[in-house]
Image (cartoon, rainbow, N blue to C red):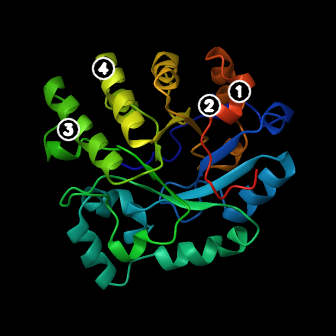
Amino acid sequence: MACASGAGKRGDAAVPGGAAAKAGLFDAHVHTELAACAEDITAAAAFARFRELGVGFGFAEHADQLYFPRQGYFEKFEVESGSLAAMRESSRAGHNRFGRYRELVAPFAAEGVPVGIEAEAAEDGPGLGVLEDDLAGWDYVIGAVHEFRGMGSRGRTEPMADLERDFMQQTEKLCRAGVSVYAHPFRIFGRRGREIPKHLYRPVAEMLAAHKVAAEINFHTNRPDPEFFALCLELGVRLSIGSDSHAMWEVGGLEKHLALLGELGAAGRLGEALWRPPCAKR
């Protein structure tokens, strides 16, 4: 599953305020109304909110979801969302919405807003779960592990070693594919009711460092572990800020991100510690 509609609660995100506006942050992970799991968010409303707050941001829509109809996605199409073959078939049937996404964000890109996509590793190919024609033209790509793809139809009773192996294989595939940011590291384990495998912190951080991929601080249905991000900074991995907004109440709520940066001792050196798209104006 790429995201969970309604999974958060209003109390999970701090109310947007002046602290975020003064911090020089850049939120690279904002969704639009085209996401199957979008709530009341729209690109236009998010743009207006960020401009009001004075916070830089970029759109990054779920690539896999754009290949299938938004209505009924989770009931009918989610199981196929990692398959390039299924994406091609759905595109031939006229369901590809990448064109709509490009049209939707074009006015904001003209105003200087960077635009990217959030992509998973392909189930049936060596790279990302995005067709070649749809991969070009983005300012950045966020890579994410949303499912234990290699587990097939088997369930939550899979041995932990198998889940870890699949997770690491997907992570390596994303890094080798050249993504700029690694979304919500390790969140998939908590979402599946498993203990976070902290012994994988260093291998993942070393992989990100080797491929120059930023690690995303993301509180959307997630509890980022400061220990992992401290290790990332130690190894020279930049950190990316991601609200992962699917609803307007989440837009600009970056106080928790600021607090974690303060805990890491990075609040006073954001220019050195944080990643932002090269084309970002602020």
Three-letter amino acid code of the residue under disc 2 = Ala
Q: Which residue is mark 2?
A: 273
Three-letter amino acid code of the residue under disc 3 = Asp
Q: Disc number at residue 197?
A: 4
**Do the numbered discs 1 and 2 sit on residues whose CB atoms are within 8 Å?**
yes
Three-letter amino acid code of the residue under disc 1 = Arg
Q: In this rendering, which labeled residue sits more in front, label 1 or label 4? A: 1
Q: Who's the residue at 23% across and 62% down the image?
A: 83
Labels 3 and 4: the sequence-earlier one: 3
Labels 4 and 2: the sequence-earlier one: 4
Instruction: Pick whichever, 25 or 93, lies toward us.
Output: 25
Q: Which residue is mark 3?
A: 166
Q: Position of residue 162 (x, y in %)?
A: 14, 31
Q: Position of residue 210 (x, y in %)?
A: 37, 37
Q: In this rendering, which labeled residue sits more in front, label 2 or label 3? A: 2
Q: Quadrant of residue 17?
A: top right
Labels 2 and 3: the sequence-earlier one: 3
Give the distance between the C-alpha atoms of the residues marked 1 and 4, in whole angstroms: 29 Å
Q: Position of residue 130 (x, y in %)?
A: 35, 65
Q: Who's the residue at 31% across and 31% down the image?
A: 192
Q: Position of residue 50 (x, y in %)?
A: 78, 51
**Do the numbered discs 3 and 4 sit on residues whose CB atoms are within 8 Å?**
no
Give the distance between the C-alpha atoms of the residues marked 4 and 2, in whole angstroms: 25 Å
Q: In this rendering, which labeled residue sits more in front, label 1 or label 3? A: 1
* Visible residue check, residue 68: no
- Mark 1 closeness class: few <14, some 14–19, many ≥20 residues within 10 Å: few
Q: Disc number at residue 109?
A: none
Q: What secondary structure is marked by label 2? A: helix
